[in-house]
Image: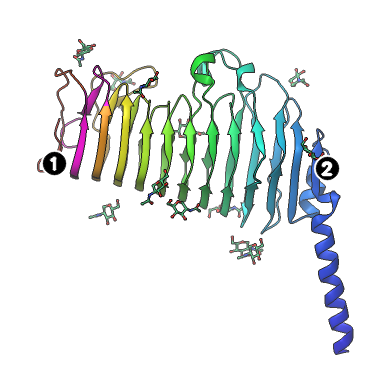
Amino acid sequence: MKLYLKVLFGLAIVVATVSTQNNNCKLTGNSLDNLNSIQRQCTEIVIENFTVPANGTLLLTRLQNGTRIIFRGIIRFEYEEWNGDFIVVSGSNITVIGEPGHLFDCHGERWWDSFGGNGGKLKPKFFKATNLNYSTVTGLNVRNTPKHVFSVTYCNHVVFSNIIIDNLDGDTRGGHNTDGFDLNNSNDITIQNSSVVNQDDCLGIGSGTNCNFFHNYCSGGHGISISTVVENVHVKNCTVVNSENGIRIKTAVNATGHVLDIKYEDITMRNITNFGILVRGDYLNSGPTGHPTAGVIIRNFTLNNIHGWVREYAVNVFVLLADGVASDWKWTNVSVTGSILNNFTCTGVPPNSGVEC
Ligand SMILES: *[C@@H]1O[C@H](CO)[C@@H](O)[C@H](O)[C@H]1NC(C)=O
Ligand SMILES: *[C@@H]1O[C@H](CO)[C@@H](O)[C@H](O)[C@H]1NC(C)=O
Ligand SMILES: *[C@@H]1O[C@H](CO)[C@@H](O)[C@H](O)[C@H]1NC(C)=O
Ligand SMILES: *[C@@H]1O[C@H](CO)[C@@H](O)[C@H](O)[C@H]1NC(C)=O
Ligand SMILES: *[C@@H]1O[C@H](CO)[C@@H](O)[C@H](O)[C@H]1NC(C)=O
Ligand SMILES: *[C@@H]1O[C@H](CO)[C@@H](O)[C@H](O)[C@H]1NC(C)=O
Ligand SMILES: *[C@@H]1O[C@H](CO)[C@@H](O)[C@H](O)[C@H]1NC(C)=O
Ligand SMILES: *[C@@H]1O[C@H](CO)[C@@H](O)[C@H](O)[C@H]1NC(C)=O
Ligand SMILES: *[C@@H]1O[C@H](CO)[C@@H](O)[C@H](O)[C@H]1NC(C)=O
Ligand SMILES: *[C@@H]1O[C@H](CO)[C@@H](O)[C@H](O)[C@H]1NC(C)=O
Ligand SMILES: *[C@@H]1O[C@H](CO)[C@@H](O)[C@H](O)[C@H]1NC(C)=O
Ligand SMILES: *[C@@H]1O[C@H](CO)[C@@H](O)[C@H](O)[C@H]1NC(C)=O
């Protein structure tokens, strides 16, 4: 009996090993037809030299617990004007891996018209993580997305690491709203060791708690931004260059919410065109109003060891908040220089905060 069980067990292992390397678990070519059966059968899925058809989504939302998804070779996307997502991933305990040498070659220039998500052609987003928990996404190499790159919504305990986003061509060819990472309704998200070259927020947090952004490089975009309902964000050891802003908190006019327990440390910025550090309560997508409203409090906001320079006609540090909105700020070892403007007067800075502007 014992021997019989052992043999059976051994067989099971052999079968399992074979099935994970089986071509039935590989997606190549350009058809999404087998995607559901692959997700039912396989806990290791290889997606190799695949072209996602027009209007199609690589919908990885029926994954078994513990599935590994491996991208290999060149992944391409056929052209269509639409508002969907190229890739959607949901599940628990999922590992998404980009193998060395792979590339998501999105050819966003087919969509770019400088309107981004605000008009012109409808454009798909690159990667939506939604209802993804206790998972990691690592090593993805992404080039020239039509608009937003990673949208993270309703996710918990997800780590993104060693991601390279290169939307550099968008600078000269009409890339817009190419946000690197957008977080909403998500908790315990870590983004680390990644590089984002784009034309909008490097990191944008709309809502969420416990977000870490460590050891990242941001170039060309709008900086590291936080908006309306956000708690406990830690940004450490990041570099922001050639961007509109370095560090930004922007809360919308008439919004209600709170921005609590925010810490940025060891940040270097260079060649910033608008604001080195910006905290404003008058934000509107169509342009800030100049009149901050008092519905969003900003409490326990720490900056430590922040260095760098902005361009002559940019502003080093600017705070524009309604009275009483800000409290418990602690800024130490902050040195942002370069501006020759002296007509920006900060309002709403809490006393004894170390803020100089
Ligand atoms: C993917 O493309 C690479 C490079 O052209 C090639 O070496 C590899 O065999 C291709 N894989 C498949 C499954 O076609
Ligand atoms: C994409 O979907 C739209 C709307 O259903 C359709 O009009 C269009 O022909 C589709 N495009 C392709 C290339 O299949
Ligand atoms: C997560 O998935 C791995 C396989 O990738 C598995 O070994 C592990 O047991 C899973 N963890 C949980 C908590 O289910
Ligand atoms: C992920 O976690 C959320 C919140 O706990 C839960 O609602 C959702 O069902 C989980 N998703 C999966 C795929 O387990
Ligand atoms: C799936 O994975 C999570 C960890 O991510 C674990 O807590 C849970 O128990 C697993 N569920 C099943 C049905 O294995
Ligand atoms: C990320 O980078 C840090 C600092 O260079 C390093 O200590 C850490 O091991 C890296 N982590 C990953 C997951 O690559
Ligand atoms: C999520 O948050 C960002 C802010 O960073 C915002 O731009 C985006 O529109 C929000 N919504 C969704 C669904 O991603
Ligand atoms: C800071 O991040 C850079 C990558 O941008 C990394 O090379 C370096 O090791 C990190 N430093 C520390 C102290 O973690
Ligand atoms: C500053 O950024 C601009 C693009 O915004 C670039 O052309 C210029 O070379 C950069 N200057 C330095 C000193 O990095
Ligand atoms: C904000 O609210 C005030 C008072 O209700 C209103 O007059 C104003 O138009 C609102 N502003 C915006 C940008 O919605
Ligand atoms: C302030 O925020 C930090 C995280 O940025 C947190 O560790 C600390 O406990 C908070 N302090 C208070 C008094 O809430
Ligand atoms: C400050 O002066 C600059 C340069 O003259 C001008 O472009 C800008 O609009 C002024 N800003 C404010 C807030 O007055």
| Type of the residue with mark 1 | Gly
Question: What numbered label is drawn on residue 354?
Answer: 1
Give the distance between the C-alpha atoms of the residues marked 2 and 1, in whole angstroms. 59 Å
Q: Is residue 102 left or right of residue 144?
A: right
Q: Is residue 97 left or right of residue 47?
A: left
Q: Main secondary structure of the magenta part?
A: strand
Badge 1 density bin: few <14, some 14–19, many ≥20, Cα 10 Å: some
Height in image: 345 above or below 36? Answer: above
| Relative height, residue 58 to residue 136 (above, below) | above
Residue 231 spot, x, y in % from top left: 35, 47
User: What is the x, y in percent for residue 344?
Assistant: 17, 21
**What residue is shown at x 51% (from left), y 51% (from top)?**
159
> Along the polypeptide, which appears first: circle 2 or circle 1?
2
At which x and y percent is residue 225? 37, 34
Q: Quadrant of residue 34?
A: top right
Q: Residue at x 71, y 21 (%)?
A: 79
Residue that label 2 marks: 34
Asked whether 299 or 173 is in front, the reply is 173
Asked whether mark 2 and ligand 1 are closer than 8 Å, the reply comes as no
Residue extent of the magenta highlight: 310-338
**Residue 191 in the figure: left or right of residue 15:** left
Q: Is residue 8 visible?
A: yes
Q: Magenta span has 327?
A: yes
